[in-house]
Amino acid sequence: MNQQIIMKRAALMVLALVIFFACVATAFGAAKINTCSLITKPEIEAAVGQNITDSKLDIKESRLSADKQVFESCQYFFGPSRVLLITVNPISDPASKVKKRQKGMTVSDVQGIGDQSFFIAGHGLLQLNTYKDNSNLLITTTVPDMTEEASLKTALKLLMIKALTRL
């Protein structure tokens, strides 16, 4: 067999392997994340200092992404009309763009959690927004009394660290 034919076959074999492994990686990367398994009820109760009264999985279509991605969030209810929401999205916008959209909200960076993290606070809500690998994980809670904001920030950081280990 001549050298040129051997090289073409070798190149085709390598190309076929690259395509195969790219397909496998895509299939595994698209695995669904169960948001309700990222943080347990006892972990949330310990962090917020209140009993969880109920939880539910909520599935919605994103209003912000151009391709209308569907995402899951897990809602935990505690105290009088309090909610803690955990959401995982594929990254569609960089953190800088998300931060710029927060009109009338306070945005503050958080060091040492995920690839990049920041809090968004205001209008009775507190959200820890974390980028890790190809995911954007959000933990959001209601804050009826802003004197609780500092303790809730600590709680959300602890919960985010736990969630990232299960992502």
Image: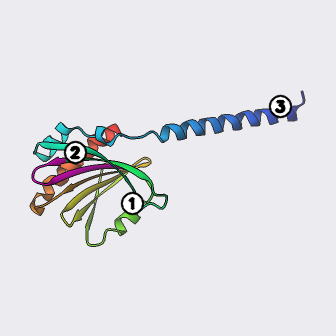
In terms of secondary structure, where does tag 3 sit? Answer: helix
Q: Return the residue nearer the eye: 24 or 34.
A: 34
Residue behind mark 1:
95
Q: CA distance from mark 3 to mark 1?
A: 48 Å
Q: Nearer the viewer, residue 139 or 8?
A: 139
Label 2 or label 1, whichever comes before in sequence order: 1
Identify the residue shown where x is 14% and y is 43%: 53
Label 3 with label 2: CB-CB less than 8 Å: no
Q: Position of residue 21 (x, y in %)?
A: 60, 35
Q: Residues within 10 Å of mark 2 (few under 14, many from 20)?
A: some
CB within 8 Å, label 3 to label 1: no
Q: Position of residue 80 (x, y in %)?
A: 9, 53
Which residue, given by chain and number where applicable, does mark 2 sit on?
158
| Relative height, residue 63 to residue 2 (above, below) | below
The residue lying at 43 percent from left, 47 percent from top is: 133
Residue 124 percent location from the top left of the image: 18, 63
Q: Earlier in the sequence, mark 3 or mark 2?
A: 3
Q: Amino acid at mark 2?
A: Leu
Q: Quadrant of the C terminus?
A: top left
* Vertical relation: 87 (above or below) 20: below
Q: Quadrant of residue 5?
A: top right
Question: Which amino acid type is shown beneath numbered disc 3?
Answer: Ile
**Between 117 and 91, the one nearer to me in the picture:** 91
Q: Looking at the picture, which amino acid does disc 1 mark?
A: Ala
Extent of the magenta region: 77-89
Tell me, yes or no, whether the highlighted magenta stretch contains residue 57. Answer: no
Name the residue that disc number 3 marks.
Answer: 6
Q: Quadrant of residue 96?
A: bottom left
